[in-house]
């Protein structure tokens, strides 16, 4: 978009999505360039099969383009995209009936060390917090995953999980209380 003085001004996601819905391929390309990198990185944290992740990202943007007029415009487009991608990933992995594990980091074999964020995620999965998370009910664990680990708002998590916002808030509150108890018990066990 050009301003009156000839300078380019970045269009917002909502404007780009409306333009893409009207057939503007440049707008669709800009949305892809803006969101595909972070979406790919997030999906790779859940599935180490790059081919599956690439397919899911492509499916996500195809769905975004086909359903562009369905987006109500409340919340961030990124949250809506994440919801689409997450559902596509779950469907793809269920169809494969395979468990996809986080990659093992071995600096000696690869010469690489994981990024700080990856180390935190591995600690969440395998440390005391991982044990506490596994003790939660699936509904509570899904809310913690969406709101805490994925950083979605309660509104975005509500859409993603298909429950009301107040339900997300209540489940998150109860899940945090259960996590505190589980972690406190783990600390007490460590002192014995």
Image: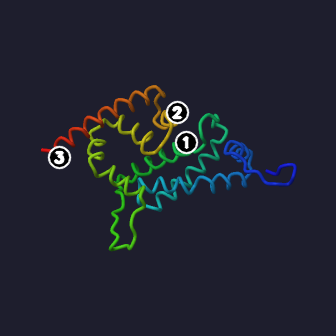
Q: What colouring method underlies this structural image?
A: rainbow
Query: Tags 1 and 2 in contact by the CB under 8 Å rule?
Result: yes
Residue 178, how many percent across, how many down? 29, 33
The residue lying at 82 percent from left, 54 percent from top is 7
Residue 174, how many percent across, how many down? 34, 29
**Which quarter of the figure has residue 67?**
top right
In the image, 164 versus 89, the foreground residue is: 164
In the image, 97 versus 185, the foreground residue is: 185
Side of 52 relative to 58 (left or right): left
Query: Residue beneath label 3, please?
Result: 190
Q: CA distance from mark 1 to mark 3?
A: 39 Å
Tag nearer the camera, 3 or 2: 3
Q: Tag 3: Cα neighbours inside 10 Å, few (<14), some, or many (≥20)? A: few
Query: Residue beneath label 1, please?
Result: 79
Query: Tags 1 and 3 in contact by the CB under 8 Å rule?
Result: no
Q: CA distance from mark 3 to mark 2?
A: 38 Å
Residue 84, how many percent across, how many down? 53, 44
The residue lying at 47 percent from left, 44 percent from top is 87
Circle 2 SS class: helix
Q: Looking at the image, is 191 positioned above or below residue 103?
A: above
Query: Residue beneath label 2, please?
Result: 155
């Amino acid at each position: 978009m050009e301003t009156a003085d000839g300078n380019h001004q970045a269009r917002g996601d909502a404007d780009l999505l409306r333009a893409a819905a009207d057939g503007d391929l440049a707008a669709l390309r800009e949305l892809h360039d803006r969101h595909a990198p972070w979406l790919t990185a997030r999906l790779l944290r859940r599935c180490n099969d790059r081919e599956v992740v690439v397919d899911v990202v492509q499916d996500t943007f195809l769905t975004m383009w086909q359903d562009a007029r369905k987006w109500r415009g409340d919340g961030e487009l990124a949250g809506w995209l994440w919801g689409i991608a997450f559902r596509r990933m779950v469907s793809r992995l269920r169809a494969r009936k395979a468990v996809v594990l986080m990659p093992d980091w071995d600096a000696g074999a690869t010469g690489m060390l994981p990024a700080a964020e990856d180390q935190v995620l591995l600690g969440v999965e395998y440390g005391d917090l991982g044990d506490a998370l596994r003790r939660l009910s699936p509904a509570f664990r899904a809310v913690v995953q969406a709101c805490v680990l994925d950083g979605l708002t309660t509104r975005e998590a509500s859409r993603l999980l298909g429950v009301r916002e107040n339900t997300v808030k209540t489940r998150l509150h109860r899940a945090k209380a259960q996590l505190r108890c589980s972690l406190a018990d783990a600390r007490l066990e460590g002192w014995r």
